[in-house]
Amino acid sequence: MSPTNRLLQGQGSTVVETGAPEVLEKGYIGQSIPRREDKRLVQGLGTFFDDVRRHGMGYVHFVRSPYAHAKIVSIDVARALELDGVYGTITGDEVAIHTDPFFEMSVEPGGNIKDYALAVGRVRHMGEPVAAVCAATRELARDAADLVEVEYDPLPVLVDAEESLKDETILHDDAGSNTVWSGVFDWGDVDQALADADHVVKIEKLHFHRFSSTPLECAGALVEYDKGTDEWTLHCNHQMPGVGAIWMAPALRTGIDKLRFVTQDIGGGFGNKICLHPQYVVLCLLARKLGRPVQWTEWRTDQHTANAHGNERTFLDVEVGVMADGTMTGFKVRALDDCGAFPRYEPLGCIIWAQVTPGLYGWRSIRVDFTQVCTNKSPVSPNRGYSRMQHLWLTERIIDIVATELDLDPVEIRKKNYVKAEQMPYETPNGCVYDSGDYAAALDIALDLIDHGSIEERRKEAASRGKLLGFGIGSTLDSGTNNFGQSTLLNPDLQFSGNNEAASVKLDIFGEVVVTLGTVPQGQGHETTSAQVVADILGCPPDQVNVRRGHDTWFNSHAGFSGTYASQFAFTGLGAVKGAAELLRTEMVQLAAAVLQAPEEAIELADGFARIKDGPEEAALPFMALGAIVNANNAFLPPDFNPTLNHRYVCRPYFGMVDTEKKTGQLTLTYATQIHAAVVEIDPETGVVDLVDYAAVDDCGVRINPMIVEGQVHGATAHAIGAALSEEFVYDEEGTLLTSNFYDYHVPHALDMPPLKTGAMESPSPVAPLGAKGMGEGGGGGIHCICAAIQDALASAGKAIVYTSCNPPHRVWSMLQDPEATRANVSVTSK
Amino acid sequence: MSAAPAASRAISLEVNGEAIEYEVHARRLLVHFIRDDLGLTGTHVGCDTGNCGACTIHLEGDSVKSCMLLAVQADGARILTVEGLAGDGELTTLQSAFNEHHALQCGYCTPGMLMSAAALLEQNPHPTEDEVRVALQGNICRCTGYVNIIEAVVAVGEGRGDEPN
């Protein structure tokens, strides 16, 4: 694609369009239509899972381990059961009898791990559920849980991945090792690339810390069991029910058809609501055992302690080859990922990063020796930017550390090494295809927004006030629409590949257009954007399109990988909506042609009518007439014409197969670009980092609703700012989480957020149905640019190297006090 | 429902203009009384420590976090929840501004944000951006980065709440 850059001014943000977007002719697509979801939500009339009530329901509270690692000697629920109003309990022993361990995705040794819904015989992280109590009220369930007596025999605790790797203490005896998965990814010829380089920069250790997006609504569900049909209904906030059912049904020894997932409004997900199957299985067992609906709402402290953390990753022995002119030849690294006590969604994180192997850069030789281990910390779960964010942080750190050490300009080294617009579509060394984009142009927009030209002047001015000013860039890709076949690069026996999402669109009796989604929105505005797409295809106003809220397995509008995750709604979700709407459109045209006695080519759908183009006014059928004919008044239709006006479509993108020998293939289909730029001021007395200027530029191809896209950019930026400056799950040596609530785990508040400047480009995806790329995750751009800006600010105060992704004041202060300690981490060998 | 261990107490209060008499568990938090006993589920719970503000309501005209009070402490009080903001489905200017300015995504923090912002606008009809940030510092949003929330509240103060961004 040759970009024809066109600068557009819109809504206070800078917009550049590259190439002509292939959107539908007229349109609601591309308009910032206010969201239809909002009307109920601003009145407090949304329906979240905790709002659902059933007669006779019991409230569930989990009894959780206070130890990070211990043998369970005994559990006694007698005193809890004696309490009036307690309906019943369940313990790990019962779980072990009535269920099978969850399916594990890894090869040995991780594949041998036995993970049950409750701890069986041993606890492996603080907060791990060992029993559950169900009672008449929330308060009573909590009281009764306190009466459950559990005797523990503490075991040695592992909180450090490098210690864990030594296998001196083993967490899972069935596995016989703490290693879940390990493997080497080797593309190009990295030894040659390093040998050819003029400089080799070595970095001993970089650490990407543990945090999570902490959605404001905690996890939970109301579960009903129907004894007559042996079916469960889960009113829940699982964001990936398709895969949740794959875990749950075999564990419960039932069929997937026996599990009905219903979601309505969900209070944020960010990936943290993907691994809810252990708790949900406990609820299913309790609902069956007690013969009543059971409800569980996770407490905030429990969510922080024992639900879903993001992957923590340590990068060791990084070596980067750099030519005299700043061209990078390749790099190698040992990556050590800490997945906490149980793998669950892992080891997928051991491959997901490979979607963005070279970052935005032209490196052709890369070797990553990847190992994932268990520790006595909370299990991880996908978290906004899942696994790619960690790897992109590494690539951005490499760029800025090389720039610092070789005295290169961070802007110039990026522009020199970025994949160029004229190289698009670009195949990476591991066979992924970057579909479109112009990274250098996006960087220029970001630089303009923060007035890069004035940085040195502002640096001087800040210095006059005793402040250290720094500037940094974070360039990332948000890779969207996963190929689940990448899992076979970890375990060739897995029977997953490709991807799919479903939607149905029908025309009802009175002309109502009804859309049902397989996706599971948690704030992304799917009802609004789906209506925009359908309205354009059917020729009616969006207001005439009813998009049903949430997901319901019984709607039959879902597919195996249904859910909202991995930046794919714009591709698969809207692709399915588009496909179903087009099938409906075809039938509506056929029907109108039959009724109006005209050729199909003469029929147009517009303004809520099917009519003969340029025909007389009466040669027009309102949608209501079409709906009524097929659904209620169809005797005259010829027998060989049987329109249903009800269409289900599955969007199944083509990926091809991956090469498990070379570890190559199309791991994902679209690549949205984010370029973030930050200007920080550091107070050398306190180490406090103040964000004084910030810009985020996003290029996700065609924007179906630019307002919603910008909202996602804002949100992803806030997550990254929080992670970069304060959010961290900190453990002590006994495995106790020290940041288990919003006091100790500080997420950005209104006062913490800098004014954000945003810019946008549109490089339409040549592969996506609407030219639109998934973009909701962002790439953690804020973490990268803030790390870079801090390093830049510290350049004049000892030239410390930023080696961790989280830099709260005490850490910055330490870098100011002892910059050499960080510099010892880095060395340069030059020819 | 079976008896809970705690004693109960009769309270009377006014909720969204309606007089309510209720025999409430003495230990019940006000937020759980509003949600579970009165069925007004627009008021949300996002934490257990009083940090997040999703449960913000008006008590005697002041914005308070309803998870930080027992229901019995509201005896005799006048309470407004998010359900009481709009009369008969007519959105207030503030609610419309949240829609027009895309000030919400998942909508979970929204009721608390609206209640805090409404209390601010009551006391200070034309707040500056900084004043809005201070007034909303007790409300956590994990979706929006606050950008459009702040913009929406400022816009209401400037008399352009119902205009698009």
Image (cartoon, coloured by chain):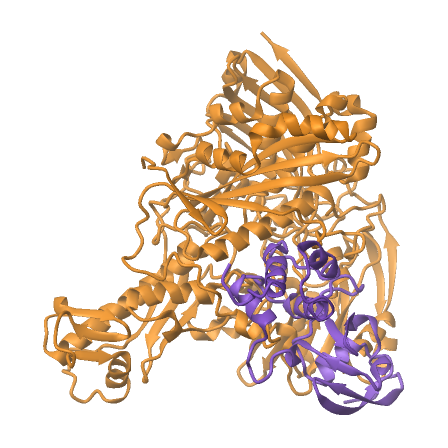
Q: Is residue A6 above or below residue A573?
A: above
Q: Quadrant of residue A428?
A: top left
Coordinates of residue A370 in the picture (x, y in percent): 60, 35
Q: Quadrant of the C terminus of chain A?
A: top right
Look at 71% across and 85% down and name the residue there.
Answer: B38
Name chain A's colour.
Answer: orange
Q: Residue A740: x and y, percent?
A: 79, 55
Chain coloured purple: which letter? Answer: B
Q: Can the viewer see residue A314?
A: no
Total labels: the figure holds: 0
The outermost residue toward the top is: A831
The image position of residue A666, as x and y in percent, is 41, 41
Q: Where A373 falls versus A547 (above or below)?
A: above
Near-viewer residue (A308 or A618): A618
Camera-side residue: A266 or A147? A266
Residue A456 falls in image quadrant: top right
Residue A514 shown left or right of residue A737 in the figure: left
Quarter of the image that includes the N terminus of chain A: top left
Residue B151 point in image, percent of width and height: 60, 58
Left or right? Give the position of B162 relative to A100.
left
Instruction: Write the residue at 77% across / 34% down.
Output: A812
**A797 left or right of A360?**
right
Can residue A825 be seen at all in this image of the molecule? yes
